[in-house]
Image (cartoon, grey):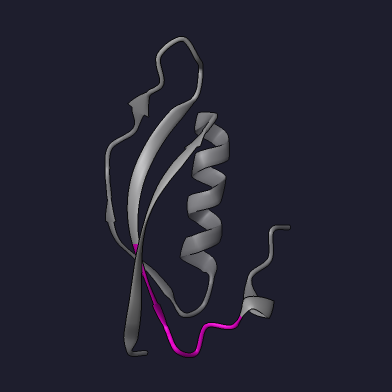
């Protein structure tokens, strides 16, 4: 797989939700997490945030991504 594009994201949510999101991205064919920060706590909230860089290939198609 040749990784072509790269995006940088800030992901915010409850710790279990962020971890679930990361599992979905890791299982999605044609994607790879290049960098991932440690979790940072949001002030006044139980939520956390992480920063990730994701590379994806030309082969990635929107219909391969499932949220279930």
Where residue 13 appears, as percent x and y from the top left, is 53, 33
Where residue 1 appears, as percent x and y from the top left, is 37, 90
Q: In this view, does 32 lie above or below 10?
A: below
Residue drawn at x 46%, y 63% as measured from the top left: 26
Q: Residue 3 lies in what quarter of the image?
A: bottom left
Q: Relative to residue 24, is residue 58 drawn left or right?
A: left
Q: Is residue 68 above or below residue 19?
A: below
State the residue lying farthest toward the right: 68
Name the residue nearer the viewer: 4 or 32: 4
Numbered label tally? 0
**Is residue 57 part of the magenta span, yes or no?**
yes
State the residue lying farthest toward the top: 44
Q: In which quarter of the image is the C terminus?
A: bottom right
**Is residue 11 part of the magenta span, yes or no?**
no
Name the residue nearer the viewer: 20 or 58: 58
Where residue 20 appears, as percent x and y from the top left, is 56, 46
Residue drawn at x 48%, y 52% as measured from the top left: 22
Q: Give the range drawn in magenta.
A: 54-61
Where residue 63 appears, as percent x and y from the top left, is 69, 78
Residue drawn at x 41%, y 21% as measured from the top left: 42
Q: Relative to residue 22, is residue 62 drawn left or right?
A: right
Q: Is residue 3 above or below residue 55?
A: below
Q: Relative to residue 29, is residue 10 drawn left or right?
A: left
Q: Is residue 66 above or below residue 14?
A: below
Residue drawn at x 52%, y 83% as measured from the top left: 60
Q: Residue 2 lies in what quarter of the image?
A: bottom left
């Amino acid at each position: 797989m040749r990784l072509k594009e790269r995006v940088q994201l800030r992901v915010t949510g409850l710790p279990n939700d962020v971890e679930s999101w990361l599992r979905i991205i890791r299982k999605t064919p044609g994607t790879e997490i290049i960098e991932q920060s440690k979790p940072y706590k949001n002030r006044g909230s139980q939520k956390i945030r992480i920063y990730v860089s994701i590379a994806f290939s030309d082969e990635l198609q929107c219909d391969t991504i499932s949220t279930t």
